[in-house]
Image (cartoon, rainbow, N blue to C red):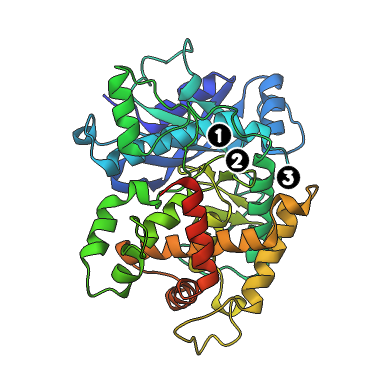
Amino acid sequence: MTPSPSRVASIMLAWHSLELVSCSTLQTLWAGYGHICAVSARATTTEAAAHLAQLCGVKSTSTGATFPLILKLISPPSKKAGTEDEGHLRKMLSYEVEQCFYSEVVPRLGDEIGVAQCLASTRDMAGKPGEDELRRLMATVMVDLRPAFPVAGGKRSSLSTRQVRAALDWLAGFHGRSWALLPGSRDELVLPPLEEAKRRRQSRSEKGGSGLWLNGGYTYLATRRKEYASLVDDTDSEWSEALCSAPEGFSMSVAEMVALVLTPSGRPMESYIHGDVKSENLFTSDSGERVAFFDFQYVGLGLGVCDLAKLFTCSVPLDMLVEDEDYLPEQLPMQDGERSLLEGYRARLLQGQQADVYPWETFRRHWETALVDWCRFQASWGFWGNTEWLEARVRSILSDQGWRDWLYQEVSSRGD
């Protein structure tokens, strides 16, 4: 029998001399894969109180103090167990990746990056009381961000101007900080779902990738081949011909070339990316000047502009991107508002670095390529957000011979 969230919380809190005061469900995860719960925990020792106070960023207190925490509990539907459906595999691997991020990466990010600190995880429960009871579950207990960041971003909603700039500042800080945290070897990073499942089968063990995603995000082409095949066949969509056909002299389609260029390959500007940047995955301070992100299921290697492409399309007000939001031409070059946001992000990203680490022209080409890739996913999945802006920008990019020449050169250098 699967233990209740309260039971799971009690077991894990006890590892740190804490006792459960309350546990209430905030959210049921997609397709019944588990729960997110608000937990209140009481310290039973002065050491436990000091440890929790440090994690929560509050003044040290004494025995009996209570602290707000979050439990993320993963217990997939039994009918899904053992299946190799790509969507199921993606979800289960994403929860493993998120646990790794909170356990291994967050403690090394520093205090300037707003993210929940991890208290306990089933990832490292070996030898602890209650291990047998939790064996078939994945659970993480972390600090509740809401006391410090009480304003929720909201589902599919635009952020305020101040929140947008704070989000870009957070992303630049996270991407830049992660440059010093990247693994020396990529062998332990998690492959795309079907490839990772194959690797684990061949090793006859559950041990395969145990770090973050080798390719951050969940929309990149290698893991969206079914959707891409549908777009190829969708002759009613302008994007079928524009993205799915191969330019003369190449065997790859534009979409495949774009995917190749965005695939991590050891370039100095590559970093960890969040992988699912949107308003509903962040909290802000009351003033909107500070942001904290959560939901790190798709964190992994990539170019930071891939995070920006989704943010700009789904959460940035249109009037921050264009001069006249009432009229968008079929083809839209970069406008001053868009450029200003990108320049601000890049300046923050390169603080303490030489500008030639990521020249503007290279950054711009990567940005344009990320927009084309994001349009490919939306065209195959369904458009939402600043749809007209995205499509107009991508039409402009695809018609830019300078961008095409750059893309072809990048692909040729990798060997088509």
Query: Does 126 appear above or below 298?
Result: above
Distance (Cα) linking label 1 and label 3: 16 Å
Furthest-top residue in this view: 127
From the viewer's perspective, tell me whether residue 202 is left or right of residue 107. Answer: left
In the picture of the structure, the residue carrying the numbered disc 3 is 112
Asked if labels 1 and 2 touch by Cβ distance under 8 angstroms, the answer is yes
Identified by mark 1, the residue type is Tyr
- The image's mark for residue 116 is 2
| Quarter of the image with the N terminus in it | top left
Q: Secondary structure at mark 1?
A: helix
Q: Quadrant of residue 227?
A: bottom left
Q: Comparing marks 2 and 1, which lies closer to the viewer?
A: 1
**Image location (x, y in percent) of residue 398:** 45, 71
Q: Secondary structure at mark 3?
A: loop
Q: Specify which label sits upstream in the sequence, 2 or 1.
A: 1
In the image shown, does 208 or 13 lie closer to the viewer?
A: 208
Query: Residue at (47%, 31%) from the top-left corner?
Result: 189
From the viewer's perspective, tell me whether residue 333 is left or right of residue 111. Answer: left
Query: Does 301 appear above or below 338?
Result: above
From the viewer's perspective, tell me whether residue 81 is left or right of residue 307. Answer: left
Query: Residue at (46%, 13%) from the top-left corner?
Result: 126
Identified by mark 3, the residue type is Glu
Identified by mark 2, the residue type is Ala
The residue carrying pointer 1 sits among few (fewer than 14), some (14 to 19) or many (20 or more) residues within 10 Å by Cα, namely: many
Distance (Cα) linking label 2 and label 1: 8 Å
In the image shown, does 47 or 341 lie closer to the viewer?
A: 341
- The image's mark for residue 102 is 1
